[in-house]
Image (cartoon, helix red, strand yellow):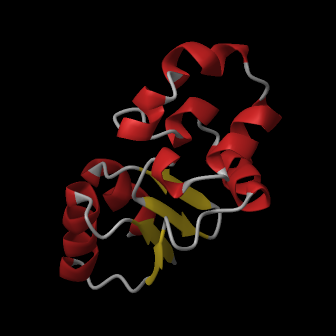
Amino acid sequence: MLFIGYPKCSTCHKAKKWLDEHNIEYTERHIVEDNPTYDELKKWYVTSGLPLKKFFNTSGLLYKEMNLKDKLSTMSEDAQLELLSTNGMLVKRPLIVKGDAVLVGFKEAEWIEKLN
């Protein structure tokens, strides 16, 4: 299982603590130092069944600075995926990839259902 997060992210800390408490093994990946690629993001997006907007860190400073709230609706999916692949700070975290399960953000009930 792959855990993609950012060390200074409090939600990532909570998620890792939850994984550790439930003895779930994972490989950790720093979202900024090793940003997800276009191909990875496209695969995860398709696998997750979630709207692409769920992959954006909408509360992040970069998202707000780039005024993406207004721009995303006019961008193609390819353009959005390309943008996400340029900077890990645009990607919602934590991101869990385990087989055919892709979880975006930390929602304990969803994690219990998908990871146990």
From the viewer's perspective, tell me whether residue 31 is left or right of residue 49: left
Residue beneath the point at 51% across and 36% down: 54
Reply above or below: 95 against 7. Answer: above
Asked if one can make out residue 25 in the rendered structure from this viewpoint, the answer is yes
Q: Quadrant of the C terminus?
A: bottom left
Q: Image quarter for residue 12?
A: bottom left
Q: How many numbered dots are placed on residues in this image?
A: 0
**Residue 20 x, y percent position in the rendering:** 24, 81
Residue beneath the point at 26% across and 59% down: 9
Q: Image quarter for residue 34?
A: bottom right
Asked if one can make out residue 51 in the rendered structure from this viewpoint, the answer is no
Say which of 104 and 90 sits in front.
Answer: 90
From the viewer's perspective, tell me whether residue 109 is left or right of residue 58: left
**Residue 67 x, y percent position in the rendering:** 50, 21
**Residue 64 x, y percent position in the rendering:** 41, 28
Residue beneath the point at 63% across and 34% down: 52
Farthest residue, direction front:
65
**Residue 66 x, y percent position in the rendering:** 51, 28
Say which of 98 and 14 sits in front.
Answer: 14
From the viewer's perspective, tell me whether residue 107 is left or right of residue 68: left
Q: Image quarter for residue 61?
A: top left
Residue beneath the point at 78% across and 34% down: 79
